[in-house]
Amino acid sequence: MDLDCIATFLRAEKAKIARLWENEVRADQPAFGGSRPVLCDHLFEFLDGLADWIDGDTDSAERAFEFLVSGPALQRLGYGVGLETLTREYSKLRMVLTRQVLDLSTDASSRESIVRLHEGLDHAMSNATHLYAKHREEVRERFISILGHDLRDPLSTVIISSKTLAANPALKSDQRMVAARIGRACNRMQRMINDVLDFARGHLGSGIPAHPTQSDMADVVRAAADEAVGANPQRNITCEVTGDLTGAFDRDRVHQAITNLIGNAVNHTDDGIEVRAFEDGETVVTEVISHSAPIPADIRKRLFDPFASFDSGSPKSGLGLGLYIVQQIALAHGGTCEVRSDEGGNVFSIRWPRVPAEPSALGGKVEGLDRGSRATGLSEARDPGPARKAANG
């Protein structure tokens, strides 16, 4: 058989190959259902590209591979057709092509063409993955931009306006109360937007950014505790700091982490809350302790998952991003998170290195609890008894 026999077959039998491939794709239920396969509109061009690759015309092949996912196919990826679907379609096409070329001949002269065929398929899939990732990154950046500007800016205007109305003595007291209520609701919306932004950076990007400067952790912890007391005057929140707590910390991010932990405790227990900070050699340790029922082991394993939600009967449970963001902030400092839970209470602690690890040592992007637990040394200590309440802010 001539060396170009397989390439000639691909060009001559495009309709047959397309029919066999589409039948395979549609039979692969429930992944595809009755939807139109992603590669369908450009399969003929793709097969011509594979034939060019086998013939050694890699420039023409590259153009065919790029066109395949740079037009309508890539648009469909942006509208909910995931990379897994595209990968499975390639897999089905590889199976159909392998069967067809093996039916042609299996002699020694065709082996190099078969190798080139699979090499071309692999190269095209690599290109598709790269372009899809690039497209997804553009969508992520657009998403962050919308949240960061188009939503936060007008919301800030509403917050300022509500504060002005709430402080206006010319208004009746009930009208000022309504304005104050609007302000509180907007503040909560602002926190939720910030949480989603941090999630987008941490889960989809390169991690929540931190900019450590020489700071005293004692000041940060006291400020976070004072803020929580002011927002919850009816709650018993105590703060204790001891020892030398200086080091390189991002004050705003640390404040955010401590505030999230305190808010998590406020939302999920009616008992007292303790905030502590103390030195431990080269690290500074912060703890938020709630004296409530233990958290079950199965829930502890998922506490730091993004969007995790555990029914506690609280109307302030939020998006379930608070503890995830705490974990990401600890990661950004090269810190470690620990959860301990028993009949004595629930302790959420973070160890902050006085000198943060280099960015390369942090493992870069962290996705979800599995990677985070390895990078932060997240642990669960002591098996708890039955729980009445579970936590996640």
Image: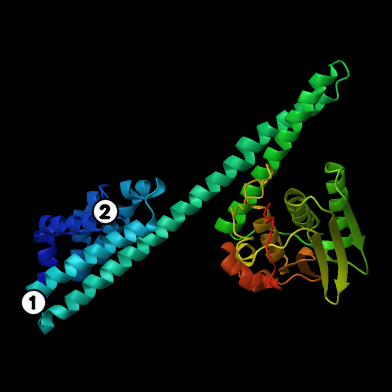
Q: Is residue 227 left or right of residue 126?
A: right
Residue 84: x and y in percent read 37, 59
The local crowd at label 2, few if under 14, some if 14 to 19, many if 20 or more residues have their Cα within 10 Å, is: many
Where 325 sits versus 106, above or below?
above
In terms of secondary structure, where does tag 2 sit? loop
The local crowd at label 1, few if under 14, some if 14 to 19, many if 20 or more residues have their Cα within 10 Å, is: some
At x 40% / y 57%, what residue is drawn?
A: 131
Where 20 sits versus 111, above or below?
above
Q: Quadrant of the N terminus?
A: bottom left
Task: Say what amino acid the circle numbered 2 marks.
Answer: Leu
**Residue under pointer 2:** 39
CB contact under 8 Å: marks 1 and 2: no
Q: Is residue 214 left or right of residue 184?
A: right
Residue 99: x and y in percent read 15, 70
Residue furthest to the left = 1
**Looking at the image, can residue 284 be seen?**
yes
Q: Point out which mark residue 105 bears.
A: 1
At x 11% / y 55%, what residue is drawn?
A: 15
Residue 27: x and y in percent read 21, 57
Q: Is residue 45 left or right of residue 229?
A: left
Q: Nearer the viewer, residue 162 or 378?
A: 378
Colouring convention used in this rendered image of the protein = rainbow
